[in-house]
């Protein structure tokens, strides 16, 4: 779990550098990270269900890597900051995009993982 967490948090940090959020800007890095993580976790779990991965890999990939890659706490703070900056509509759109697109991408990842042999 520890090694997976190390890689996941490093990847999230890298995306933060690649998509920096300026003060008062839209949190694209956290949105992109969480959406990518939703797809990847759906994909991984579908592959694991088909017996493609070893039992130990859940702790590395599912819990460690994806658990530290995605971030609900940063998402929550982003929503609070958007509301405090009187950008309630942007906050609502951010929540909506995160939930709907996240669920959709998890489903697409799961279906993609089931189709691949």
Image (cartoon, helix red, strand yellow):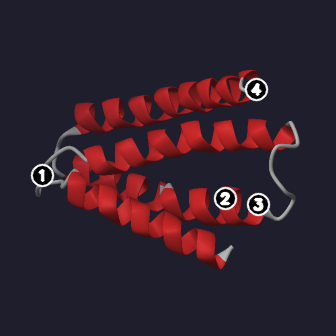
Outermost residue to the bottom? 2
Q: Which residue is mark 3?
A: 57
User: In the image, what residue occupies the spot 61% across and 76% down?
Assistant: 3
Q: Which residue is mark 2?
A: 61
Q: Residue furthest left?
A: 23
Label 1, on which residue? 24
Question: What residue is at 18 percent from the left and 55 percent from the top?
Answer: 20
Question: First in sequence: mark 3 or mark 1?
Answer: 1
Question: Image quarter for residue 110?
Answer: top right
Q: Nearer the viewer, residue 75 or 33?
A: 33
Q: Is residue 63 left or right of residue 69?
A: right
Relative vertical location of residue 101 with respect to residue 86 in this rendering, above or below: above
Q: Picture coordinates of residue 70 (x, y %)? A: 50, 55
Instruction: Tell me whether circle 3 and circle 1 mark residues in contact (CB < 8 Å).
Output: no
Q: How far is the residue under mark 4 from the one under mark 1?
A: 40 Å
Q: Residues within 10 Å of mark 3 (few under 14, many from 20)?
A: some
User: Percent from the top left, x then y, of residue 67?
Assistant: 60, 60
Return the residue at label 4: 114
Q: Are marks 2 and 3 in contact (CB under 8 Å)?
A: yes
Q: Secondary structure at mark 2?
A: helix
């Amino acid at each position: 779990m520890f090694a997976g967490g190390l890689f996941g948090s490093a990847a999230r940090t890298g995306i933060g550098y690649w998509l920096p959020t300026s003060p008062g800007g839209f949190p694209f890095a956290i949105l992109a990270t969480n959406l990518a993580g939703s797809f990847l976790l759906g994909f991984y779990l579908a592959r694991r269900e088909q017996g493609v991965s070893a039992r130990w890999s859940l702790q590395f990939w599912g819990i460690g890597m994806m658990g530290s890659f995605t971030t609900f706490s940063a998402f929550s703070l982003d929503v609070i900051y958007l509301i405090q900056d009187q950008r309630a509509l942007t906050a609502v759109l951010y929540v909506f995009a995160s939930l709907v697109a996240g669920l959709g991408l998890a489903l697409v990842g799961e279906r993609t993982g089931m189709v691949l042999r």
